Image (cartoon, rainbow, N blue to C red):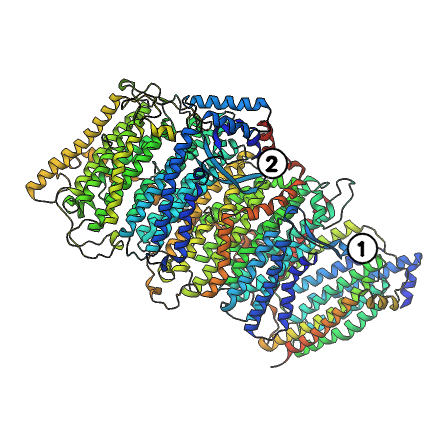
Amino acid sequence: MQLLAQVSSETDLYVAQNIFFAVIAVTMIYAAFRVVTTANVVHAALWLVVVLAGVAVQFLFLGAEFVAVTQVLVYIGAVIVLFLFGVMLTRASMGDDETVAGEKRAMAAIVGVLLFAVMAVALVDSFEDTRVDIDGPQGVTEVSDAIFSQYIVPFEAVSVLLLAALIGAIVVARKD
Amino acid sequence: MFPRLAAGAVSEVSTVTNEANWLLENAWLIALLPAISFVLILFFGKKMPFKGAEFGITAVSISFILAILTGAAWMEHRDNFTLDTFGEKAAVLVDDGAGSAVDNVTLAVGTAAEAAGGDGQAYVAVQKTTQWLQSGGVEFNAGIMVDGLSVMMLFVVTMISLLVHIYSTDYVGGDRRYTHFFAFLSLFTASMLFFVLSDNILQMIVGWELVGVCSFALIGHWWEEKPNSDAALKAFITNRVGDVGLLVGMITLFFAAGKGMTFDTITINENILQGGVSHTALVVAAACLTIAVMSKSGQFVLHTWLPDAMAGPTPVSALIHAATMVVAGIYMVARLFPVFWEGMQIDGSSINFLATVGAVTLVGAGLLAFVQDDIKKVLAYSTVSQLGYMAMALGVGAWTAAVFHLFTHAFFKANLFLGSGSVAHAVHSFDMKKDMGGMRKFMPKTYVTFLIGSLALAGLFPLAGFWSKDEILVNTGGWGILGGSASAPGSYTFHFVMGMIGAALTAAYMTRCVYLTFHGEYRGGHHDDHAEDHADDHGHHGEPHESGPRILYPLYILSAFSILVGFVNFPPGFLTGSKKDPAGWQERFLHFIEPAGSSYFPAVGHATPSWWLAIVASLVAVAGAGAAFTYYFVKVDRLAQRTGEHLVGLPNGVTTTNALARAGHKLLVNKYYLDHLYTGIIAGGTKGPIAKAAYWVNQNVLDGTVDGAGRTAVQSGKLVYEKIDQGVVDGAINASGRTSAAIGEELRHINTGRVQNYAAIMFAGAAILAGAFVLLLAL
Amino acid sequence: MDSWILTAITFVPLLGAVIAMAMPNDDELHKRWALAVSLVAFGLGIAMLFDFNYDQAGQLQWVVDEPWIDVIGAGYTLGVDGMSLPLIALTVLVMPLVFLYSWNHIPSPGNTKSFLILMLILETGMIGTFVAQDLILFFVFFEVVLLPMFFMIAVWGGDDRRYASLKFFLYTLFGSALMLLGFLALFFLAKDPVTGEFLRTFDMRELTDTAGAGIARSSQLLIFGGMFIGFGVKVPMFPFHTWLPDAHTQAPTQGSVILAAVLLKLGTYGFIRISIPMLPEAAEAWAPVIGLLAVIGIIYGALGCLAQTDMKRLIAFSSVSHMGFVMLGISTLTDFGINAAIFGMVAHGLITGMLFFIAGSVKDRYHTLEIGRLGGMLIQAPRLGWILGFTSMASLGLPGLAGFWGEFPAILSAYQPANGLPVETFRGYMVVAAVGTVLAAGYLLWLLQRTAMGEPSEEFANDPEVVDITPLEWASWTPFLFLIVLFGVAPGLIFEVTDPAVVESLNNCLQFENGCDGVADATTAALGG
Amino acid sequence: MLLNQFLLLSAVLFCLGVYGVLARKNGMLVLMSVELILNAVNINLVAFGAFRTDVGGSVFALFTIAVAAAEVGIGLAIVLLMYRNRRSIDLTQADLLKG
């Protein structure tokens, strides 16, 4: 894991790195596209796994090792499992029965494209060719220090939130 | 008011003083007492033994006494505030100035005093002002201004109010809203006095509106019946129309003549008279204020509310719709006379808006009075007509004559109204033709007072109306042959003629009214429930009987005044004594009331009275009365006696034989169709089609746009999709057919209420906004 | 008194709401608690009124200036001057009365606790908007108001509540999005007039001092336009007003009262606090448009009233008309006009709030607000009828009552707008606005005639539910009635507080130094003073 | 490496997520699309963190992951409840907001 980040700091490997990025990115985009288009719910969940894994790789590119690991553990490990449970519990069909009206898809597509256009213009306009230099991976120590000093209040807030979500989920889904 | 102290020092000291008799300085007490009485009646009225009437009567009595004392103090002030004392005061007032400043002041005062008659007396109003509020660098003051005009009004208002209070204890006795009635009488009295005393135009607006709302409440006193509340609404809304003129006119004055700094009446008048105020602004202000007068003082074409206002109890009609509130417009013009004097260029002219409105009203309303069956409506149109006299007088520059007519009219018209109330009290109706006739036998005392009032109104020598009417006519300067017009402000021939016609009409319709009410045979007696049965619970309908003392005594007093008040302004040379004898009897009214020579009043010329004119005018009035007398007292009466029928007119009069006369009669009966125009077309139009149209636009266009915007966001997405997607898949298809089909489809699926549609709109909106922002930053 | 008071008055209701959430579900307890909390806020408000330095009414007082979100330069900046003080006082006064009124007027479907909690949150939002001196903070409070109101309409509203609440929500959200856009643009574009550097601040004081210096005129116009729509929706100005009648008609009485009394003022307050002082150049360009829309609103709202058959809807439309007067005063850009506008806001808050209370009570008694079915209220419930009459009179601008001082000076100020504005146009507006007063008399008296006068309709003639005013209603209404009279008789109470602040806020607008005062000065000179 | 490549990638994912949220009928699939959006945000956070060499980006990404987990939990609970009540998780039938 550390390898990738180290490699990235060496200038002559930029090309290789960019190619690697491109491959991952294209894979992710395709996978994401399938997530939102496939008719089969289980397939969608599996495609989502690919996207999430890709995101984890992107995190590695950016030197955020700890986040990448968390991403794999939490998302691929827990969230996807939850989804699959959900699919089974709701007996959502495994087959191709996801039929959505075409007009609605078009509307959504237009909104999406519009959003993308705006964002793309804004991004290209403001960051042009700003480089991001990764000196090396972020240590877990750094992250943990930050969490438990500077960001302690949001951290506590998030923990309360999780607790609340836990209780909330139970209350909502309880059978009575 | 900084600039006035500095720049206006000269004019100020020559016009206003704060130093005067205690009574003059504290005249606001007169207005305060009825206001206190209003509050007391409101909160405790029902618990009191006389249901609140005692508060009102006590307060107004004290006010009345104070008003008399104030009047006396004013006379003393007017006569003794001489040049010498004045010079000293001026020197004190400008104490920080150099010696020359004092000289200037004295000089200016000297000039003013000479103009006043060279008797060493200056006409100095008393003003007490305090800051009310301050906003945007403008001070709004509250204060009182006491001069002859306001003292005169104080007397009239408090006296008639007191008499009406006493009268009402009997007339309205037993009414379910007896206490409310007195509360509003008190409030009205307070508001009217507030209006009269105000020293600035803003306060005048306040008082003007307050009397309007009291009038609304009192006209609608018996609001259970729709015609009454309709009349109240009509009165209020018509007055509001005039208020547009008032607001615009006053605002124009504030900026043009008050220089955007002061509402002070005196300063505004002074600024106008000193010149330097845009003439255009004055024309606009004068025209707008004339509109205000048209509504409040019932001038053509906004007079229609006044006859309808007779739906209120009779004492209210006497107090508000005859003697006091309706003259507020006249009072306002008199107060702000320089506006009209300069704005309409009254001096040396022969026609202007105000005078013409007055003249038309005078004759137009006089004609309408002929076709009324309701005794109060006759009097109402008569009031309109007489107010026309006053407006015309002001328009032709006869300031004192107008104010004098206001003064005399208040007494005899209140007398007539209360008299008509007394009759109606007996017969429980106001309809002269159906329920009256021959009342002379049943109510001789009321008859005498009513007759005196009628004669005074008709302007027959030597009753009050004669003197004031004559003064107006002579001051029109209209007819040189009869003499006396030489020094009148202008030469208003048209208005003179209208005044003459008005005199004849007045005499004639009052004769008709007296005949129909008091002479001939009693036509009532049949049971006929009419408006007035709220007023009392006597219940029985036998022979009508004379009213009680609380009704009669006010009538006696007013009759006495109707006879006597004309004498306070003998024209010069009328009795013995020199022409300008201040100690004599002549022109006392003019001397005390007209602010001649003060810097806030223009140099108005006064016509020389003419014996000839007085005689001709009297003859005209007698001729009018005579014609009506011949018709009713001679012809109709004889016919009635011959046939034994109850007649109210000749069966073969001109209206039955002559088509033109019939058409005229129809026009009059329909009140020149003005009510149709207002109620049917304007009000009905606004309330109905126009308001509905506006609301339709609201619901369908504006709201539709908004609802539509949401739909369109969805729709346009779909439409574009249809074009692109379908185009790719299916190739070229008939575009128009597809679009129309698509639109039909969309219209069915509008408003899905699905979360995702809303989310789509939200995202799209966010995208567009963000895009806008990006563009904005790029600019 | 220290700067803590602003924080306290703002967050006491919120704190109260949080505590209320934890309290057991006992209706009586919650009513008492909510009333107590709002009374604490009211007490703080009274303390503020006493402690306020009236000689320095033009300056911000009790200023709090703490960093908040440093990254984006947003600060926790609070402060109150003469412009906001009357509005805060109005807010803290109205809320306890509304809670008092709620004692036995909890609209269906009940759930007193949530209802009261929402109102407490609402109070925090409203006060916060008036005290905030930072654009982001302002925006946050501005939006905090939105949700409780949405739920009040959506849950406790009338039959058509879903539609009305959603419309209210989307409308305002749309407006505030544009407003936020304007705020951000200000943040990015405002430059220091001296150094020419970008300020990058949301601090309203600094932005006011800058007064739009360094921003291109075209951008200024766009930014003002965005804020104009944002605030205009809230006011509501013609043609953004269509949410108002629906929201008012469907909202429970308390919601209507709060909406009329305070919420609408957030928009006008935004104009005088943010739009005009920060972008004077654009304000000058937009002023004729604002004035035009204002007078259209006056006439249009009045015509809308005349077409109504529902009492509450009529009152709602009258709000459009009255806020037109307020906007007309603002559009003149003179201190005189803006003073009038602030007075108009307070007066409208009291009067229209009162009218909605009455409408609510009428609904309680008759179970309908259909004007055609009512009638003879003066016979059945005489005091209610008289109070309706009194309030109508106040609403149509009768002198001596509060309404007049919002209306008349606004009309007056239009005669002489600030220098640079088209005088003839504004004089035209003045006349149209004056005509609007006639229509106001028309619809209000017409309402009065049809509901209060005449004989009671057969339907309700012997209805035992139609009773006169209850003691509780007296308790919650008397302050309104008293203040309507008080401000009518002594308008200086408000004008003298607002005047210095308004002068101060217009002070920075260089081109307006020769506004209304300029005329006065010139005249003084001409008179030789 | 350019900052923009990450940002644009995230923008693509975000928009695809939005598309999914808007176009999908099935509640489960909508939730998955939401996950896409959240991940796009995460990439942004971490990219900016790396760009500014600030650890805050990573920290907030972690928080987002936590929040996302909570969101999925609640979301699934709601979907389950909906399923129990209507025997369907078709969002197009959930039109209670219909105006």
Rendering coords of residue B752 (x, y %): 55, 63
Q: Amino acid at mark 1?
A: Asn
Quarter of the rendering occupied by the C terminus of chain B: top right
**10 Å neighbourhood of mark 1: few (<14), some, or many (≥20)?**
many
Q: Secondary structure at mark 1?
A: helix
Residue labelled with disc 2: C517
Say which chain tag 2 marks: C
> Label 2: how many residues lie within 10 Å, few (<14), some (14-19) or many (20+)?
many
Q: Eyeballing the image, is C293 above or below C168?
A: above
Count the marks: how many? 2
Query: Residue B232: x and y, percent?
Result: 35, 48
Tell me which amino acid carries mark 2. Asp
**Figure quadrant of residue C309:** bottom left
Residue C76, picture quadrant = bottom right
Q: Is residue A144 above or below residue B591?
A: below
User: Where in the figure is residue B720, as x and y percent of width and height?
Assistant: 61, 54
Which residue of the protein is positioned furthest toward the bottom in this rendering?
Answer: A176
Q: Which residue is nearer to you in this view: B360 or B15?
A: B15
Residue C480 located left or right of residue B154: right
Q: Which image quarter: residue C66? A: bottom right
| Residue underneath mark 1 | D4
Chain containing the residue with disc 1: D
Q: In the picture, which quadrant includes the N terminus of chain B? A: top right
Residue C220, x across and y down, in percent: 67, 42
Instruction: Single out the mark in the foreground, 2 or 1.
Output: 2
